[in-house]
Amino acid sequence: MRTCPTAALEAILELEPLHLTIEQAAKRTLLNFAREGFGRGRTISLRNRDKLGSQVPLALLPRDDRPKVVNFDRNFKIELCTKATWSSSLMERLIQSSSLQWYTDGSKTPEGIGAGVYGPRLQLSVPMGAYPSIFQAEVYAISLCAEINLRRNYRNERILILSDSQAALKANSS
């Protein structure tokens, strides 16, 4: 209502005053611009950097975050198989020729959604709560399996990740 004091409502609802929220968002944006770098072709020129540094010294502090690195190399192949292929000797040879075999799955129980990863020296079950979908659990299980293999730093190994979710595999292949 027009007669209700805004400051009192903000205090009751534990809301930060609007001018402080806007100021904080502006500072965050300024720091993001400063993080991009300075100089020709950058977001902030060297002249503006010096002016910025005199007004907000915080913007010139070194950052401890990592630069964004994009890797477009695809060191994996996704094969979608039919039931007939699974029962053939071709699939049997593929599985036997792999040095490492991993199994991933996402599932839903009355307790909630979960993701599972099973492989060499690891049997992992990750509860994800009640809100994710089974598809999200399947994709998470596959990505978690890939992360585990990357952390284990395998070299020159043929790694086979088996999943029963065609939708998750197709999402990872695009």
Image: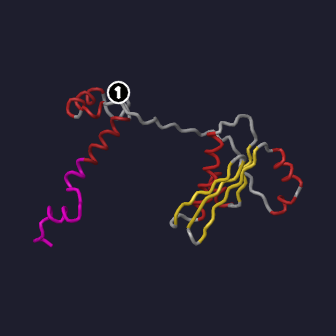
Could you say which quadrant of the image residue 8 lies in?
bottom left
**Which of these two is toward me, 174 or 95?**
95
Q: Which residue is mark 1?
A: 39
Q: Look at label 1 and name its amino acid.
A: Gly
The local secondary structure at tag 1 comes to loop
Residue at (12%, 66%) from the top-left corner?
Answer: 5
Residue at (21%, 29%) from the top-left corner?
Answer: 54
Residue 19 x, y percent position in the rendering: 19, 52
Could you say which quadrant of the image residue 42 lies in?
top left
- The answer to if 144 sits in the magenta stretch is no
Residue 113 x, y percent position in the rendering: 57, 65
- The answer to if 20 sits in the magenta stretch is yes
Seen as rendered, the residue at the extreme left is 3
Does residue 71 lie above or below 46 as drawn?
A: below
**Which of these two is toward me, 166 or 64?**
64
Does residue 35 lie above or below 89 as drawn?
A: above
Seen as rendered, the residue at the extreme right is 89
Does residue 19 lie above or below 69 as drawn?
A: below
Using residue 153 as the reference point, say whether residue 53 is left or right of it: left
Residue 34 x, y percent position in the rendering: 33, 35
Using residue 119 as the reference point, say whether residue 96 is left or right of it: right
**Which of these two is toward me, 163 or 76?**
163
Could you say which quadrant of the image residue 138 lies in?
bottom right
Crowding near the residue tagged with mark 1, few <14, some 14–19, many ≥20 C-alpha atoms within 10 Å: few
Residue at (84%, 47%) from the top-left corner?
Answer: 96
Q: Which residues are magenta?
A: 1-23
Residue at (75%, 44%) from the top-left corner?
Answer: 100
Residue 58 x, y percent position in the rendering: 27, 34
Does residue 97 lie above or below 168 as drawn?
A: above
